[in-house]
Image (cartoon, helix red, strand yellow):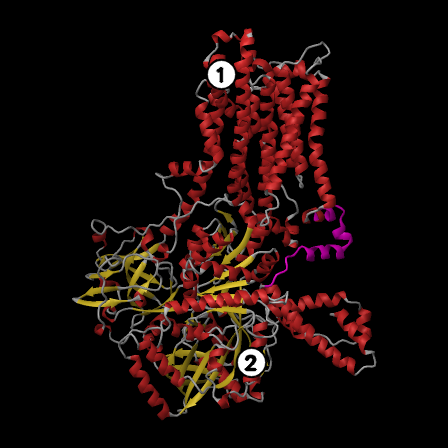
Amino acid sequence: MAGGRIRARIHRSQLYTFACLKPGSTETDEPHTVEGPGYSRLVHCNESHMHQRPPLQYGSNYISTTRYNIVSFVPKAFFEQFRRVANIYFLVAAICSLFPVSPFKPMSMIAPLAFVLGVSMLKEGLEDWRRFMQDMKVNSRKASMHTTNGIFSNKHWKTIRVGDVVKVEKDKFFPADLLLLSSSYEDGLCYVETMNLDGETNLKVKRSLEATLCLDSDECFKDFKGLIKCEDPNPSLYTFVGNLEYERQIYPLDPAQILLRDSKLRNTAYIYGVVIFTGHDTKVMQNSMEAPSKRSSIEKKMDYIIYLLLAALMVISLISSLGFFILTKYKMPEWWYLRPDQAETCYDPENAFASAMCHAVAALMLYGYLIPISLYVSIEMVKFLQAIFINKDIDMYDEESGVAADARTSNLNEELGQVDTILSDKTGTLTCNQMDFLKCSIAGIAYGVRASEVELAAAKQMALDLEDNSLEDAAQYPIPEIELKTVVTCKDMKGDKRHIKGFSFEDSRLMEGNWMKEPHADEILLFFRILALCHTAVPEYNDQTGKLTYEAESPDEGAFLIAAREFGFEFVKRTQSSVFVNEKYPDATKPIQREYKILNLLDFTSKRKRMSVILQDEEGQIFVLCKGADSIIFERLAKHGRVHEEMTTRHLNEFGDNGLRTLALAYKKLEEKDYVAWDNEFTKAKTAIGGDREGMLEKVSDMIEKDFILIGATAVEDKLQKGVAQCIDKLAQAGLKIWVLTGDKVETAINIGYVPHPEKSSSSMVCLQPSETRNETNFHFIYNPRLIRQRWEEVPEKAVKESILNQMTNAIQMIKLEKDPHAAFALIIDGKTLTYALEDDMKLQFLGLAVECASVICCRVSPKQKGLVTRLVKEGTKKTTLAIGDGANDVGMIQEADIGVGISGVEGMQAVMASDFSLAQFRFLESLLVVHGHWCYKRIAQMICYFIYKNIAFGLTFFYFEAATAFSGQTIYYDWYMILFNVFLTSLPVISLGVLEQDVSYDICLQFPALYQQGPQNLFFNWYRVLGWMANGLQASLTIFFFNILAFYMDAFSSNGRMPDKAIMGTTMFTCIIWVVNCQIALTMSHFTWIQYIIIWGSIGSWYIFLVAYGMLSPTWSEEVYMLFVDVLAPSKSFWATTLLVTITCNIPYFLHSSMMRCFYPMDHHIIQEIKYYKKDVEDKYLWTREQSKARQSTKIGFSVRVEDKIRQLKGRMKKRASLVIMGSKIPRAQAAAAVDDLL
């Protein structure tokens, strides 16, 4: 590519002062000491076969994120299944069924257990197989690898070994951790995007050793050999220690030469590198953890319910055994027909205690229906079907990428409805990493009429508010309009002008050369030149579009260059010493190409927060052009350079209120002698060797970067991904707390967690940092990374910890003393401070402060710290956490959180592979939680409660019958009845409840986000609910048993005088149970479709079909059921009357309780259901709107708060103007003021 060859001739290393801190000659550096523990790795370059046998035998580049493998699946899956208490019970019961004491046949106990375990393990296996296939997709990526004799060929990533030489081309991911040998640039530089690792958007500059620069073509590697001695695999992304032995010389290695797996090569045609770490030894994989086994909080609570049911089972078994002991010892000798003289061990009155022990074992098995074995398999099936509905949700399908939602594990569906805190990555998850130049301030004058997203939303809301006021009041009291004209104008103009990516600026005063007519044209000219000249970008000709594109280190820089081009100052060329700009000045029709000689470039770093370029124009005048954070620039202004400071500060505040990111621009002129003197000092510092070189460079840079003249400021819009602002707003209204954990800088994250600050001060920001950087006159802190990093090593560790601890204590006290109910605070902390805050003696206090704040922003955090913060929130608050991210740097927190969500974007698949759910865009999280999470939580909660109810209603009848038959150990039901009860006759209705139930519709969930709080507050699965359903099951079992006993005990069953036997009694009682439990689930449901009708009535009807069909079989098979229904039950009026009476009586208590709760203690969804049923949402719009407002949690963060803050400002401005109008009118002041208040 031609552009690549042009760029390759530029020695890019000379553009950078701070990004490449290695001195010009590395041969003078002393090698690192790489001996001892932690430094045992040897890498034979270009000899990968050396590492496949002892003593080295390094792992392959194959990665796996699955939970199981062929060997571990069976033992690990069994372990997972027997973590469930009920399964342990049924395993013991199945073993006991093999002995004579069992009241059941072995198959009736073993078959259900085998079925439950089999289905659950099959589901686990299928879900893990999907993870395996995604792993294979990554492992099968191709990379160009040296094979032999200077020949490179494409190989799968999984085949790459330590020591292999690979060639990576532009925009490709690095397949392993590599040592950079050379690049397409002559001085061995390359640009790396690490957004997938640390979330930072700025490109990192890497530089190879000078000794390996000659390895710049495929043929050079034919005889290449070398030996690397370095540190062992570790999770530190920012450190590396090692030496390279090459051609009998030893060269020290540092992080500047290391390219990490899953980072991407940018702005560089190609690089060559040798593999140091592969697979799970790579630093990104070292930061991930073993795929955890997660269980939902409901499933954990189920264990306690099972414990309670087991305790009840043991109690009634003990009562039964005690009764059996008394009757066997004292009554059985009188029952001659039982032949007590020939009794077996289990019925021996001479050894009643041993008989009671045998009976206890039998009783534990007999009453086992209290424990719902089919509950687990039903839940597995329901969750699997719920996951299908989540995957098929068209509202969570992204048309642009063609990616749908994916529930990678269905074990946590209900957990989606109980989330309390969301921990989110920023770059790639919330933002598009795209900046649009929108507004600017030049010489104290604001330019740019297009509205930001915040202004548009505020204007829309204000327009709706104004529409609600009567036209009469508006006519009677002349209130000036809000300045919404520009908003409407911008909206209308969108279709008139082609949108330019990165440039959304609109203002005729500056466009088309009109800026030359402005009063400060000279300063505007300087402003445009700073945009076009102060950068490190490289232009590249695009053959397809025929235009220049810019390869910039950050999206901000790219937006500035596009803006400069649109203003008439197009950056077109860069050479080693100059940049060329086509300027449409002084004649816009005849561009002039001007050359500016680059003398020095002080590049931007996160520590400096500014960049400067020293250049000489065609007239020989030397300029220093600087752009950076306003706090940094303002402190470096000369006294005569502050003319526009006040107005620029006001504009910066306005831009910030509108949700825009700002930078200040300044300049100064230099005399040549002053520059020469400074350049000598700078050259000495730049070529110095030693640990203090960075400090010397910073000191010399400070000498030139001062006494600036302020020109103006820029305002760019950090484009959030589509729907992110509204999604965060909706989640906040649903009562969810949102933390932002990012590796990026603080300025880029603050907008996400915006909190209002009415007095335009830092009063709402709580920044934790060392005490030396504090503003001692005010408690609130000034965020100054430059001072922070300067002081870290100067302050003793103990003093730093004490400082941070005192700040946390004071911040907590200040928040508690805050009297304003609308006050909100944002906690901001960086990675180094977080290191101390997460220590055992400080982490609880840090958490206490964090939960008191409306927004928490952790910046510059490592992947490991993301996981540690997530663990702290999860374990410290004891509430459900959800982590969401899109990069490999998010894997730790995704795995650590109760629920992990991966964004399946363009930055690799590591986050998705480690996640429990994957989405195409962050905005789909709204539907996933507020809709599906809400539904799944209520469905599973109601399903479990109903299961407990029906099993108690069924299981306790065994105990009643045994008590009535002298604790004989007999069951009243035929064996097939008991098998069919859970497997067939009552299983489908409960599955339909778990899959199809909706308390409110999809749209209503989104309109009433506060309904979501029913999950985090656990309103449907607390002990009150569980015990209430148990009590309902108890009354149902009593009613069923005793109504049947009273109906048949003394009376003939049929008109021919036949008395009921055990078969008749058991079948009638079982029929009542089938009717009762199926009618109960019908009363429980709020949402019916034809499917529910068919399933419920079909389950009842299938019982009668079974009785008829099975009764027609030969008596050899049907035994006591032979023709029972057709000849005996169906003709009997008592059978039908008993069934009807028992069904109504059992369900009356639930019906009355439900009616009372709806009438006197209604929940939110009850009110909504009633409004929808009576169509009040159509007839009374005001009522519907009022209920919507009531059903929103008050929120103090995010987009909606920024909009409300903007509305308050607009209303204040409107009221002020209205007051001026009133003062000049004849309307009574009090009357007019009241009218203004009503309007606002």
Residue 899: x and y, percent? 49, 50
Q: Amino acid at mark 2?
A: Thr
Look at 50% across and 13% down and name the residue there. Answer: 349
- Secondary structure state at the residue bearing disc 2: helix
Image position of 855 (left or right of 133): right
Question: For the N terminus, which image quadrant?
Answer: bottom left
- In this view of the protein, can residue 1230 be seen by the observer? yes
**Mark 1 or 2, nearer chain start:** 1
Q: Are marks 1 and 2 in contact (CB under 8 Å)?
A: no
Measured along the vertical axis of the image, is residue 1118 above or below residue 379? Answer: above
Other-residue count near label 2 (Cα within 10 Å), few / some / many at <14 / 14–19 / ≥20: some
Q: Quadrant of the C terminus?
A: bottom right
Instruction: Classify 206 as above or below 620.
Output: above
Give the side of residue 1185 with respect to residue 342, left or right.
right
Q: Amino acid at mark 1?
A: Ala
Q: Which residues are magenta?
A: 1168-1196
Residue 1169 within the magenta-colored segment of the rendering: yes
State the residue in front, 1007 or 494: 1007
Q: Give the camera-side residue of 384 and 561.
A: 384
Which is more toward the observer, 190 or 219? 190
- What residue does disc 2 label? 649
Measured as percent of width and height from the top left, residue 103 is found at 51, 19
Residue in front for this viewpoint, 761 or 990:
761
Q: In which quadrant of the rendered view does residue 172 lie? A: bottom left
Q: Secondary structure at mark 1?
A: helix
Label 1 vs label 2, nearer the camera: 1
**Which mark, residue 352?**
1
Is 949 magenta? The answer is no
Q: From the top left corner, tell me how far across and down residue 159 is, in percent.
A: 30, 51
Point out which mark residue 105 bears. Answer: none
